[in-house]
Image: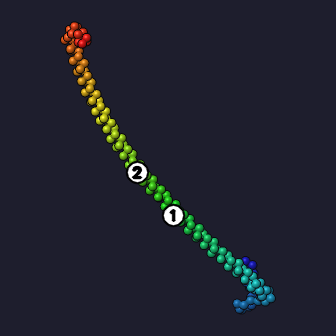
Amino acid sequence: MEAIEKLQSAITMVNEARAVPLSASCVVHRGELLGILEEINQALPVDLSNAQKLLANRENIIEEGRQSAEQLVAHAREEVARMVEQTAIVAAAREESARLIDEAHAKVEKEREEVDAYIDSRLATLEVILNKTLEAVNRGRERLAGASDKDVLSQLAD
């Protein structure tokens, strides 16, 4: 920055210099201008070096930013892929759970029908047994009603 200020000072000196009549020339103090130009000459390498360092750092910073951005994008893509995979897994799990629930309902219904059929067959068997028992009771009562008291006692004695 020092060189720029000195250069500005030299430009100001030339602008403010006394003009030579009937020409585009001007009169400047040679010693002062040479002093300023010498200071500019000495300051330029330092300023140029600083500028080059800034440019080199700028490139490094830009490169670091690019790498960071690429890492962020890669991470975001991985995260999206993971989320999509989880979504697919969840959808597959839901489908599988629905299938298993349907299977369970069908199995329960089939077992209920089998249990109902078993109970019905057992009840039918019991009905047959009860009907035969009732018939035997009815026959026994009929015999009792048709037989005399002596016959019953004689049968009991035998």
- Residue 12 visible? The answer is no
Residue at 55% in and 68% down: 70
User: As rendered, which of 129 and 49 lies closer to the eye?
Assistant: 129
- Residue 123 visible? The answer is yes
The percent position of residue 75, horizontal first and vertical second, equals: 54, 63
Secondary structure found at label 2: helix
Going by the image, does 148 lie left or right of 63? left
**Where, quadrant-wise, is the N terminus in this rendering?**
bottom right
Q: Nearer the viewer, mark 1 or mark 2?
A: 2
Q: Earlier in the sequence, mark 1 or mark 2?
A: 1
User: As rendered, which of 147 and 116 lies closer to the eye?
Assistant: 147
Check the image and report above or below for 156 versus 75: above
The residue at the far bottom in this view is 22
Amino acid type of disc 2?
A: Glu
The percent position of residue 84, horizontal first and vertical second, equals: 47, 58
The percent position of residue 13, horizontal first and vertical second, equals: 76, 83
